[in-house]
Image: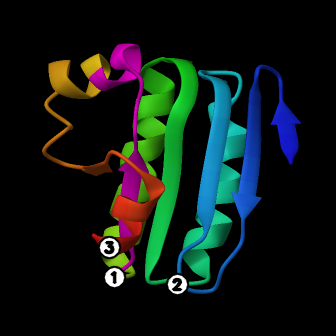
Amino acid sequence: MSQANDLSVRIEDSPEAPQVSLRGEVDLRTSPALRTQLLELVGRKPKRLIVDLSHVEYMDSSGVGTLVEIKRHTDRKSVRMVLVNPQARVRSLFEITRLEKFFLIASTIDEALTL
């Protein structure tokens, strides 16, 4: 587990579907380190990348921008990116920006593994 300021990142690495569990805040301070970690995983070309947002308490526009950038990378590499269980505050960001249609969003990790 690594920690950048107010964000902890736990990665369950799997060649088929790495799972990235985030806890805390994804913001201007924490998103650059998160971006680096996610790009490294995408570079391995797994079948899917699962990002668990169930413990993300806050996300600002830089966090959203990071996820959009990673999604574009996954699309180019034919990797399916799935976000899991964003909390109401974070989910509302996706709804306001209409990104809930851009991202695949699952309720559980098990559901994410089937999408």
Which residue: 55% across, 72% down?
Answer: 42
Residue 64: image x %, image y %?
41, 32
Residue 96: image x %, image y %?
17, 18
Spatial CA distance of label 3 from label 2 is: 17 Å
Residue at numbered disc 3: 114
Q: Which amino acid does label 1 sit on?
A: Ser
How did the renderer colour the structure? rainbow
Asked if marks 2 and 1 touch (Cβ < 8 Å), the reply is: yes
Spatial CA distance of label 2 from label 1 is: 8 Å
Residue at numbered disc 2: 45
**Can you name the residue that lies furthest to the right here?**
2
Which mark, residue 10?
none
The question of residue 72 being in magenta is answered with: no
**Front position in the image: 66 or 57:** 57
Q: What element carries label 1?
A: loop
Q: What residue type is labelled 2?
A: Lys
Q: Magenta region: which residues?
A: 78-91
Which mark, residue 78?
1
Q: Which amino acid does label 3 sit on?
A: Thr
